[in-house]
Image: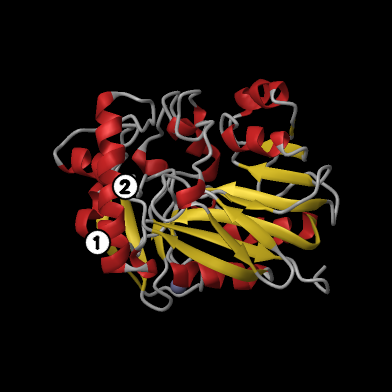
Amino acid sequence: MAIDQSEYIELKNCPLCGSSEKHLLFKAHDLLMGQPGEFGVEQCLQCDFRFTNPRPPAESIFDYYTKNYHCYRDDGICTNKTIESSTSEKTVSNECLKYSFYGGFWGSRGWVIPNLSKGATVLELGCGSGGFVRECVSRGWNTIGTDLNRDLQSNIFNMGAKFIETNLPSINLPDNHLDAVFAWQVLEHLYQPIETLEEIKRVLKPQGIFAFSVPNSDCWQFHLFKNKWAGLQVPTHVSHFSEKSIRQVVEKSGLNIVEIYGQNTIGCLYPSILFWSGKTSVTLSQQWTPINFINKLVDRFLSIFVSLIFGKNQAERLTVICVKEENQI
Ligand SMILES: [Zn+2]
């Protein structure tokens, strides 16, 4: 049950830089899951960070994730088994690391698969029903999943991985324990993103990798659709990151950014049009229904043009690779 509006928390200062100078961009509603309530989306006048304000208190936020939430369903977009192949795969190398980058610039997702050996220990924050956990287990990695939704743990066990209960920002693992941490479309949900990144740095081994993605609120769809943009997802998205604010958050945590990829996927375009036309509680799914097939074709086709016109800064999603440097504790 969504809580009463009178219990919402109103931040007086920007959660990123502390400035009290901010302005309301627009009011917004939960169009994805159709829960009641009105939320503001504000922008800091000092650092440009955008955030949901007012917002439900952290203790109540789980009430806003309904059973229909796409990451919790077995048919959801977070459990698609097929790895997108060759044409959309990009391999990135630098001096010390090599990654396979799946989903590409016009694919529907953007997992980064680091080149770790069998037996590596990895953690996925916000593992949902476990699509990426399955991928990690298949590579012979000791895989740990965690999610706000503890009902998912049997799924994760069945895949041959561990599930730990966490109360973020705290992660219940020893220092220097993990070769990699992943968080696909998770940071925007967290009430304490900087503290969580500091904790990720603590549990990573030196040279450990943190790879994550977030929706990009600098994208053209955000400016076009505003409170009807399907990537907005208030109130469960409390931060609306851009490349600039992601760099600020990661810098504060002490991790080093290796790469930021802008992915011109337009997976939000079709649901945004539905929201704009007045529909709510839209189901995001990649099952092979005719409408999804058409959506996917249009998505692929348009994305190529979008990439050419808008470039990285206006991409719908940002995928980021960070590393914990040798001398960082
Ligand atoms: Zn600020």
Depth check: give the residue in front, 215 or 239: 215
Q: Quadrant of the N terminus?
A: top left
Depth check: give the residue in front, 169 or 262: 262
Q: Which mark is residue 223?
A: 1
150 relative position to 232: left or right: right
Other-residue count near label 2 (Cα within 10 Å), few / some / many at <14 / 14–19 / ≥20? many
Kind of residue at badge 2: Arg
Q: According to the image, what is the colour scheme of the structure? A: secondary structure
Q: Position of residue 239 (x, y in %)?
A: 45, 56
Circle nearer the viewer, 1 or 2: 2
Q: Quadrant of the C terminus?
A: bottom right
Q: Position of residue 210 (x, y in %)?
A: 66, 57
Q: Is 40 located above or below residue 60 in the figure?
A: below
Q: Earlier in the sequence, mark 1 or mark 2?
A: 1
Q: What's the CA distance linking mark 1 and mark 2?
A: 21 Å
Q: Which residue is mark 2?
A: 300
Asked if labels 2 and 1 touch by Cβ distance under 8 angstroms, the answer is: no
The image quadrant where one finds ligand 1 is bottom left
Q: Which mark is residue 94?
A: none
Kind of residue at badge 1: His
